[in-house]
Amino acid sequence: MNLHIKNGRVIDPANGIDAVQDLYIGDGKVVAVGSAPDGFTAARTIDAAGLVVAPGLVDLSARLREPGYEYKATLESEMRAAMQGGVTTLVCPPDTDPVLDEPGLVEMLKHRARNLNQANVHPLGALTMGLKGTALTEMAELTEAGCIGFAQAEHPIEDTTVLLRAMQYAKTFGYTVWLRPQDPHIGRGGVAHSGPLASRLGLSGVPVMSETIALHTIFELMRASGARVHLCRISSAAALELIRAAKKEGLPVTCDVGVHHLHMTDADIGFFDANARLTPPLRSQRDREAIRAAVLDGTVDAVCSDHTPVDDDEKLLPFAEASPGATGLELLLALMLKWAHEQGGDDAALARAISRITIDAARTAGLGAGTLSVGAPADVVLFDPDTRWTVAASSLASQGKHTPFLGYELAGQVRATVVAGQVAYERRPA
């Protein structure tokens, strides 16, 4: 279907575009920006006056809960959430049940996702069998099945020899290893940031050194192996300083942060609010400010939703017993716009915010997404940056209704999401 999106403010950081222009889509791809190509006849025209037209969002961490955890969420529910949030490309961690350590499981997930004709799903394969940290998976076969990288999710490898071998194998074939830096011993069993607040509340802590010790190890293994590593959900100022130094040294490293950590601190736990029970934990105000600055200066390559739907039975418990995680797909855009507004709200801040969740995220994952370049897949989001809405469980399409932002008023609402040239979601007028 030929689609003409007119009168919208096109923001495409990949091409440095920020102007009111028309967008032309045909055969599932972008065919022109600005003027219609010769012979173009639109089957449908969308008037985007007053809206921002941007590349579909790219989310580097979204747990879809299939296979194995359908009681927490289903592929159908989370795809609806992605469409409602303007997210057209998803990277999902391998900690499903069973773990994504065999090609057949990956192919099944990809097939299920394709049949829904919504967001593009890109699984990460398990780095070790069963995420147990002992035997390496068949990375070449998993790559052929559709994996774009290899991760351990929340299961750190205790034996550094195994991690070194994994990185050497990955380097040989040009694969990227995705790691969340956490020491397997320090902070094990902790539920909150180690600090005065956790002490007052009587909660077991996860110190920042759990992150930094792991980073020192990872960087030494990178120097020895030459492997490319993506660091997932960095949470502390000290870790960001180490990453800055590693990048300056020339190590092939990238990193992301969860959007929750861009706004909240451990103080948001309040009176044991289990919705603020996250992994990694919310940290100090100093850490939050460092994260905000690092997103601005490019030390942080991408911001992800860290979407982890949790059901009531696992969340409505005492803080220390509740399962960590929060829904985020439908909040990613609005929370990035909130960050941009707090950076001054000018055009440059808005473009940078969109860049971190489109082209920057796509490049980090090695994906050809996040751009409105001619010939690129026509994955597009149309949103009103000024419409304000209140985060409520009833307004979320995700099966997971738990987020520390419940009750917050946010600006920025998705009006339509286009995937491969097809309008996959349209918000009905109120």
Image: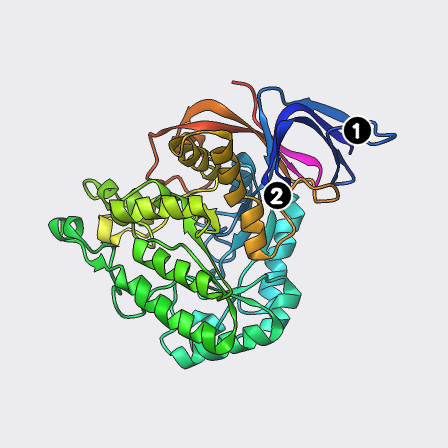
The residue indicated by pointer 2 is: 14
Dominant secondary structure (helix, strand or loop) of the stretch shown in magenta: strand
Q: Residues within 10 Å of mark 1 (few under 14, many from 20)?
A: some
The kind of residue on which mark 2 rests is Ala
Q: Residue furthest left?
A: 200
On the image, the x and y values in percent for residue 281 come to: 30, 52
Q: Is residue 420 left or right of residue 393?
A: right
Mark 2 to mark 1: distance in Å?
A: 21 Å
* Residue 420 drawn in magenta: yes
Q: Residue furthest front?
A: 248
Dot 2: what SS?
helix
Which region shows up in magenta? 418-424
Q: Residue 329: give x, y in percent of width and height.
A: 48, 41
Which sits in the foreground, 82 or 171? Answer: 171
The residue located at (34%, 64%) in the rendering is: 182
Is residue 165 shown left or right of residue 420?
left
Which tag, 2 or 1, sits closer to the chain's start?
2
Provide residue 136's location: percent of width, then percent of height.
50, 77
* Visible residue check, residue 420: yes
Residue depicted at x 56% and y 56%: 365
Residue 109 vs residue 186, the one in the foreground = 186
- Above-or-below relation of 377 to 194: above
- Residue that label 1 marks: 36
